[in-house]
Image (cartoon, grey):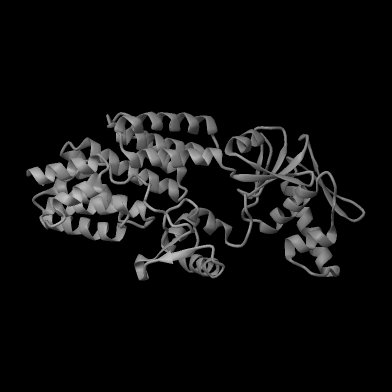
Amino acid sequence: MDSLITAAARALAAGDPLGALKRVALRDDAPALALRGIAMAQLGDLVRAKTLLRSAARAFGPNEPVSRARCVVAEAEVALASRDLAWREKALDEARATLEEHGDVANAAHARYLEVRRLILIGRIDEAERMLAEQDHVPISAALRTIRELVIAGIAIRRIQTKAASAALTRAERAAREARIPALTAEVESAWLVLKTPVARLIANGEERPLLLADVEALLASKALVVDALRYSVRDVRTVVALARRPVLFALARALGEAWPGDVSREVLLARAFGAKFSDDSHRARLRVEVGRLRKKLAPLGNVTATKRGFELKPRSARQVVVLARPVEEEHASVLAFLTDGESWSSSALALALGTSQRSVQRALDSLAAAGKVHSLGHGRARRWVTPPLPGFTTTLLLLAQLPTG
């Protein structure tokens, strides 16, 4: 590499994208294009970054496979930062294999961590954990150690294991200080907020209060019978009854849980489960059928018994019944929850993460936009959705792999 490319690479490694651009902004050779792409990504212009990195990969050509592979990895990181989750998995796998074959262990590991973080975002936690375990033997830099610990924390948070998450974030904090990269430090600070911010509400005995992640973990380990509106299940410390595919039964269970230790009238149950504004014999017959199905489902945990005005839930061994609900419940709350991470999401990425159709997500986004709760940036396939206020910079990884050498 010439002296300007070397200086620009060092500036990027130190988290100084403007310093890097001063040295290569007017150059169009392959290494300069790659460095410019990385700098634009660190400055938040992800669309321009993606274009520059693709141009760099083409400019390197087939005779420089390692440099091309590094550009593919950098482009995948831009895709992750812009929440473009439907990236070319095969291309990233091939790039990782090329890097491993040529002894570029650090960038190969970085490619693996990108895929792991994508799997976490789309909810494939078991697969992410298995892939992460394959990297245990690989020696890595302080920057990649930070990323690894952030990944471990992300998995622990999704499994509601606060001690493991806290320990991983503490290790990530130390590694980020060692790496001396401001973007990584900001990433760790952002991750800590998850443990310090309410993630759910507890509804019990007619009262509500917010819960931190540690509170949720303690609740699920307690002797309470929990109607879990986060995972659409009813559980105690030993048994989980999943009702995600039975929305009517879950609506009945939640109504009974919120009213415990009292009962719920038949009229209220009909409204909660079926949206019925009035009741007749057919409605009441249907309610009896659904209550019978719920009683059968909840038999390991308790019983649903009839009262003069309706039904009540009687736990078998639990000391109390509580409802665990989302912090905010409104229409399209799931879409809104993903957008609150401060990143810009495409509708296709949201559909992938939510496991639903892109058209359904687009209708939800249009409704939220009309209410002023979200707004979009860009047009067409480059359109991204955010919640106000707009994020000033990306915080996801920010291209910390080694740079193309040309």
Quadrant in which the N terminus appears: top left
Rendered view: 1 above or below 49: above
Q: Is residue 227 left or right of residue 196?
A: right
Q: Position of residue 108 (x, y in %)?
A: 25, 40
Give the number of marks.
0
Which quarter of the picture shows residue 40?
bottom left
Q: Residue at x 84, y 59 (%)?
A: 266
Q: Nearer the viewer, residue 98 or 387?
A: 387
Q: Is residue 200 left or right of residue 22?
A: right
Q: Position of residue 330 (x, y in %)?
A: 63, 59
Q: Residue at x 74, y 64 (%)?
A: 274
Q: Position of residue 32 (x, y in %)?
A: 14, 52
Q: Is residue 94 visible?
A: no
Q: Residue at x 34, y 42 (%)?
A: 183
Q: Position of residue 129 (x, y in %)?
A: 42, 38
Which quarter of the picture shows residue 160?
top right
Q: Residue at x 13, y 57 (%)?
A: 26
Q: Is residue 140 visible?
A: yes
Rendered view: 283 above or below 149: below
Q: Is residue 156 left or right of residue 78?
A: right
